[in-house]
Image (tube, grey):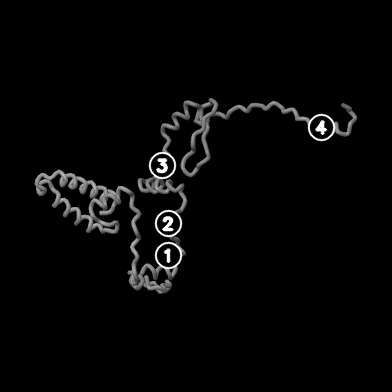
Amino acid sequence: MRLDSKYFDRIRTRRKREPETEQAPPTCQWDGCDKKGAHRAPVGRNAEGQFFLFCFEHVKEYNKGYNYFSGLSDGEIARYQKEAITGHRPTWTVGVNKAAKDSPLHSEIRSGAYTRVRDPFGFVKEGGKGSGPRFPQARKLKSLETKAFETMGLDANATSAEIKSRYKELVKKHHPDANGGDRGSEERFRAVIQAYQLLKQNGFC
């Protein structure tokens, strides 16, 4: 390697780091204490991010009597806890803001006028009740629900009243006191009860 090369001057070397001088920890801020204040303790409410520096014995003493809510009433504490759920940020009703609530359209819809809602097919009339044909939404049944409706002798669009009426009719018909000891009728009785309980648990009646 040539020391007089034009490339030699471009070689970068790391600078030697000077040894860092360790700073002595500050003195404990407890009155009359000269020990090292190596432990942080929060200052209090409205002073987040600020800390006192105490020695080990005095930070324990300070923490025993520390109360973040000191000086607040029960109502103010409850309000703080409620606001803490949302990180003390303002919240609004889902899908609604102040501008929408103050708009003429919102007040008309709330009052039932619907004066600015286009309804070319007549599905909505004044008062909010449908005037046009209604198409009931078909239920998507699971296999056990389908079997329960078949056991009850009903179709999937049966109403809650129809299910209850059919259940009372079948229970009365196949009850052990009325079937004269017929085994087949007893099995049918149990199947009807199970089918009704399943439909009831799934919100059909």
Q: Which mark is drawn over residue 11?
A: 4
Is disc 3 placed on a helix, strand or loop?
Answer: loop
Q: Amino acid at mark 4?
A: Ile
Measure the alpha-carbon separation of dots 1 and 4: 70 Å
Q: Few, some or many C-alpha atoms within 10 Å of disc 4 (few <14, some 14-19, many ≥20)?
A: few
Asked if marks 3 and 4 touch (Cβ < 8 Å), the reply is no
Q: Are marks 3 and 2 in contact (CB under 8 Å)?
A: no
Q: Which residue is mark 3?
A: 69
Q: Earlier in the sequence, mark 3 or mark 4?
A: 4
Residue tagged 2: 94
Q: Which residue is mark 1?
A: 101
Nearest to the observer: residue 132 or residue 152? 152
Q: Residue at x 23, y 46 (%)?
A: 194
Locate the N terminus by quadrant. top right
Q: Hey, what amino acid is under mark 2?
A: Val
Mark pair 1, 2: CA separation: 12 Å
| Labels 1 and 4 touching (C-beta < 8 A) | no
Which label sits in the foreground, 3 or 4? 4
Label 3 sits on what residue type?
Answer: Phe
Q: Position of residue 60 (x, y in %)?
A: 45, 29
Corner quadrant of residue 17: top right
Residue at mark 3 to residue at mark 4: CA–CA distance: 62 Å
Q: Nearer the viewer, mark 1 or mark 4?
A: 4
